Amino acid sequence: MARWSMWHKPVTRSVSWIEELTTSGGRCSRSTVVKQACSESSSIVKPFSEIPGLWKNGVGNLYNFWKLDGFRNLHRIMLHNFNTFGPIYREKIGYYESVNIIIPEDAAILFKAEGHYPKRLKVEAWTLYRDYRNRKYGILLKNGEEWRSNRVILNKEVISPKMLGNFVPLLDEVGQDFVTRVNRKIERSGQNRWTSDLSQELFKYALESVSSVLYGERLGLMLDYIDPEAQHFIDCITLMFKTTSPMLYIPPRLLKQIGAKVWRDHMEAWDGIFNQADRCIQNIYRQLRQETGPSKKYPGVLASLLMLDKLSIEDIKASVTELMAGGVDTTSITLLWTLYELAKHPSLQEELRAEVAAARAAAQGDMLEMLNRIPLVKGALKETLRLHPVAVSLQRYITEDIIIQNYHIPAGTLVQLGLYAMGRDPKVFFRPEQYQPSRWLKTETHYFKSLGFGFGPRQCLGRRIAEAEMQIFLIHMLENFRVETQRHVDVQSTFELILVPDKPIILTLKPLHASR
Ligand code: HEM
């Protein structure tokens, strides 16, 4: 515990160096200043080898990790390690080696050292699949200059605020259809309510939303009969994530060689994802070639990229597939957690409902305008991502030497910010166990605290789509239904590469208005 109380002192020093660096007119290189600072204060900067942690025996650590069911408990193990070692620790599990940090100010130092081509942990299972099937890497897996040149083009079509006007009407339509679907379920129940594990419904909502933005077309997942291929795609994404986590620690090449089931399942999952994405992409490509004149309607991200003609078709296909795969479990699980929290906090739910009603009245129903008037709804989503982040950690290979918590960390090291641990740390968030969306409205500093979508040029490419999709969903749900949950059901997270609920979340939706 003594370590914890020392946290903030050295951090202030490190940050002021970085501030000095960034305000020095850019003439002095950062590494030079760090080196200078190192030599001036070498008595207090401790070497890399002194960082506390378990990093000397990767195989032994892997065995212990496996005994602790670490493949599913990674987030809890990280939390425990920060409690044991303090705000920085080094670890090696199997062939995976990293330095882990938790303090927002240290995150600022990390991201300042990410370089021009930020690089995350390489997920070898994903690259091995593409190499094996001879498929191109998309934006998620590319690195270096190729990543940057692709990302600059994709940014304009996917994450630029200008695109929101195109995305919102498409997402709004899906949101309205979800309400109709829930009303149908309520009607059929004959009990004026619908109680269910909503996860499958939310997967469909998320896939319908992201596909509608990517392809400018609906897949029809809000209808009673749905295409079995689309359902298969959803199942494949879940399987793909689940089978990735053990392969973070055991080399997938080895598992492939011995024909391990986890590798075979992983291949099957990616095959299903690529096949469905190929079908959607070919369909739009065919339509585009048959079109005669320009259309006023927004054609979707894929068609826009094809018409722009700045990326090769293979690059477009690879990135659109990754956008489609990245756009399902991420938003749907965040929405599920949000509904769960709102069900547990009925008066907060009423506050949000009142905010949405006022926004609807002030914006006269204009959805784009409404999105500017719902700060508490946005706070609720941030709060969900604080307590239930999709990613356990953010990672970067640093491109220059840095000093964190008075330890020297050499360039090339994989440094991870423990997002889950940070969100639950009482030194970072006041009463972290409480779900309080209003904490994000206060003027107190949120410096490097809201990192659910990552940070900087390598942050989540789908962020704009995800945020709009989730805000629109909550607007429609709050306007139409009251969400309730069974009392005393405590749901935790489990690690399946992304964090997911460890048991079904059963929710009851009750209509606010009598059916017409
Ligand atoms: C609640 C929803 C979501 C969360 C919390 C989330 C979170 C993240 C995080 C933490 C990263 C890594 C960022 C970094 O390293 O700094 C990421 C990357 C990425 N996300 Fe998301 N994501 C969400 C939804 C989506 C959606 C809807 C899409 C697609 C439409 C998407 C596509 C991507 C892609 C392509 C990348 C890789 C970008 C790159 O490497 O340049 N995500 N996401």
Image: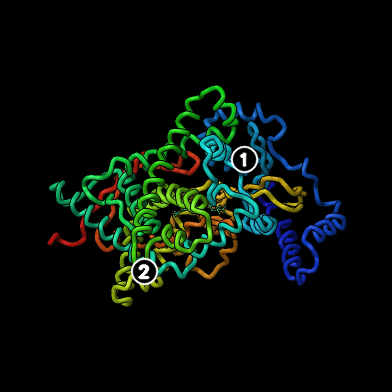
Question: Where residue 370 sits: x, y (%)?
Answer: 35, 71
Say whether mark 1 is within 8 Å of ligand 1: no
Asked whether 488 or 461 is in front, the reply is: 461
Asked whether 183 or 387 is in front, the reply is: 183
Alpha-carbon distance for marks 2 and 1?
58 Å
Q: Which residue is mark 2?
A: 294
- Of marks 2 and 1, which one's residue comes earlier in the chain? 1
Please, is residue 139 above or below residue 359 in the view? above
Q: Residue at x 20, y 57 (%)?
A: 511
Q: Secondary structure at mark 1?
A: helix
Say whether mark 2 is within 8 Å of ligand 1: no
What kind of residue is marked 1? Asn
Name the quarter where the C terminus is drawn.
bottom left
What kind of residue is marked 2? Pro
Q: Which residue is mark 1?
A: 81
- Count neighbours of disc 1 (C-alpha within 10 A) and say few if under 14, some if 14 to 19, many if 20 or more: many
User: Mark 2 or mark 1, which is nearer to you?
Assistant: 2
Asked whether 293 or 91 is in front, the reply is: 293
Question: Where residue 203 sits: x, y (%)?
Answer: 35, 47
Give the left or right position of residue 38, taking residue 378 as reference: right
Q: Residue at x 23, y 50 (%)?
A: 223
Q: Residue at x 62, y 50 (%)?
A: 143
Whether residue 250 is visible to the viewer of this picture, yes or no, is no
Please, is residue 327 above or below residue 303 in the view? above
- Count neighbours of disc 2 (C-alpha within 10 A) and say few if under 14, some if 14 to 19, many if 20 or more: few
